[in-house]
Image: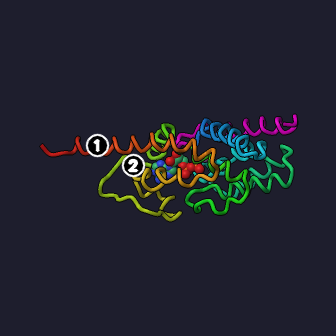
Amino acid sequence: MEAEKIHILRKAEEFARSVHENDASGHDWWHVKRVSRLARMLAVFEGANAFLCELASLLHDVADEKLNDSKEAAIGRLEAWMAQAGVDRDDRAHILSIIANMSYAGGTGAGMTTLEGKIVQDADRLDALGAIGIARTFAYSGWKGQKIYDPSIMPRDHMTRDEYRKGESTAINHFDEKLLKLKDLMNTDAARLLAEGRHQGMQYFRKAFDNEWELGNEAY
Ligand code: ADP
Ligand code: NI
């Protein structure tokens, strides 16, 4: 990779770190760093543009509505940051379109048309799976004020974006509503392979939770 691109990536790391440093909603700097490393690895496997995958990953959550008062203003700040950092016009447009298409609640990823976008989406979804995915779910749930579990709140097959935003659910329901579906939504073969092991760990946890809940709540 050219020296200029390496320099841009380094500056993007600093920028993303400053945005995510104090986050406790599961969108902390370490999430961003893992996504960028996973995306770099997937880019090698899939023969994609590694610079774009890594840069889009580093920036993928800086304009997230959970971290910003106004999404529009945050997108404006991101655009300005990319321009002054020396990211060229085509790359800026590509990265903004990837970020706009990232959200799960926004659909199944059908809007993600480029290989680089598919890779960043896969990397972000991989970080929602496995042991780290479980930890992030409970961190997010606590941050949002959701319950661990409540048998009277049923999981929904499909949540609209508004319902998803309102968080009308429980941490355990989130496994059934989203997390256990993610492995079948992976775009690339390399991510599908990695998702399989993480999915199994998550499924084991989900079953163990049910077993312990039943035993603990059984009337003797
Ligand atoms: P990202 O912004 O990284 O694309 P999300 O905002 O969808 O992803 O989710 C971030 C983390 O928070 C994920 O690990 C996810 O499982 C968890 N999370 C998101 N929504 C909920 C929810 N309604 N209940 C519990 N955990 C959630
Ligand atoms: Ni993310």
Q: Is residue 94 above or below residue 42?
A: below
Residue 133 at x, y = what percent? 50, 42
Amino acid type, residue under disc 1 in the picture: Asn
* Image quarter in which the N terminus is found: top right
How far is the residue under mark 2 from the one under mark 1? 13 Å
Of marks 2 and 1, which one's residue comes earlier in the chain? 2
Q: Residues within 10 Å of mark 1 (few under 14, many from 20)?
A: few
Q: Which residue is mark 1?
A: 211
- Residue for badge 2: 172
Can you tell which of label 2 and label 1 is closer to the viewer?
1
The one nearer the camera, 58 or 18, is 58
Q: Residue at x 64, y 41 (%)?
A: 35
Determine whether the residue tagged by mark 1 lies in a helix, strand or loop: helix
**In the picture shown, does residue 93 fall above or below 20?**
below
Q: What range is drawn magenta here?
A: 1-26
Query: x%, y% of residue 207?
Result: 35, 44
Q: How is the image coloured?
A: rainbow
Q: Position of residue 87 (x, y in %)?
A: 84, 47
